[in-house]
Amino acid sequence: MADLSAFPITRRWPAKHSDRLQLYSLPTPNGVKVSIMLEEIGLPYEPHLIDIGANETWTPEFLSLNPNGKIPAVIDPDGPGGKPLGLFESGAILIYLADKSGKFLSADPATRIETIQWVMFQMAAIGPMFGQVGFFHKFAGKDYEDKRPRDRYVAEAKRLLGVLETRLEGRDWIMGEAYTIADIATLGWVRNLIGFYDAGALVDYDKLKNVPAWLERGLARPAVQRGLQIPARP
C-alpha cells in the first residue's frame, strides 16, 4: 500500500485504497472532465466527494493539495519515479492522465500540441464564458436590472460555439477521427450550458448542426455517462 500520509488532505478524506488514484471532486463541468477521463482509461481510482456548497475546498486540508481552492484535484500514488504526486487544474490533470495511460493524446508532436491547444481553448474561453452565462442567466445575475453583463457573455458564448461549430465541420471529434482529451474537456461544459443552465435558446443552440451532433456522440459513450455521475452526490 502506498503511503499518502504526506498529503494533509488524506486526513480529512482518508484513502480506503491508497494504491489507487485519489480523486477529490464534484460532478460539475470541471469535475467531470477528470472522472470521465478516469472511466475512459480504466485506471483504478477512489473518488471523494468535495462539497463546494459547504466550502470544503477552502479547508486547510483541501488547500494543501490545491492552493487555488477549486475542484478537481488528484493524488497519484504511483507518480513519476514511483513517488506519490499531487495535481490540480483539470486541464493539467487530463494531460497527465493521457501521458500516464497512453490514451486520448497523440504521441506525434504536432498532433499533440494541436490537441492541447483545444484543451486550452476550453480552459481559457469555453469554461469561463459559459460559467458567466450560467451566473447571469440562472443564478444571482438574473435579478440584475442591467442586462448588459448577461448579454456580453451570451454574445461571447455564441461566438465560441461558432468556433467549435466550424472546427467540427466534417469531423466526428475536435481532432477529427480520434476522440481525445479536447473532447473530454469540452463535453461537460456544452452539456451544462444547454442543460443545467437552460441557456440553449439564449445562445441559439438550435441553429447549430455540428456541435449538437458531437455532443450526442460524446454522451453516447458509456464512460462519459458513468463519469458524469462521479463522485456520486448524496
Image (tube, rainbow, N blue to C red):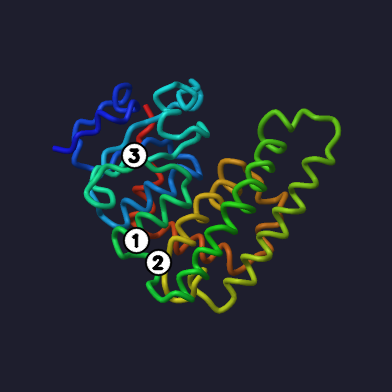
Residue 159 located left or right of residue 214:
right
Asked whether 197 or 44 is in front, the reply is: 44
Identify the residue at horizontal 53%, vertical 51% (top origin).
191
Give the CA separation, mark 3 to mark 1.
Answer: 17 Å
Is 31 drawn above or below residue 57 in the view shown? Answer: below
Q: Amino acid at mark 1?
A: Asp
Q: Residues within 10 Å of mark 1 (few under 14, many from 20)?
A: some
Answer yes or no: do the residues labelled 1 and 2 have beta carbons within 8 Å? yes
Q: Secondary structure at mark 2?
A: loop
Q: Residue at x 72, y 60 (%)?
A: 159
First along the sequence among labels 1 and 2: 1
**Badge 1 element:** helix
Which residue carries the number 3 mark?
23
Identify whether 39 is placed above or below 85.
below
Q: Amino acid at mark 2?
A: Leu
Q: Nearer the viewer, mark 3 or mark 1?
A: 1
Question: Where's residue 112, x and y in %?
Answer: 45, 70
Question: For residue 97, which quarter of the picture?
Answer: bottom left
**Of callouts 3 and 1, which one flags the residue occurring earlier in the amino acid sequence?**
3
Position above or below: 51 against 179: above
Where is mark 2, residue-wise? 105
Quarter of the picture containing the C terminus is top left
Labelled disc at residue 9: none
Total numbered labels placed on residues in the image: 3
Q: Residues within 10 Å of mark 2 (few under 14, many from 20)?
A: many
Residue that carries the numbered disc 1 in the rendered image: 99
Q: Position of residue 206 (x, y in %)?
A: 66, 60
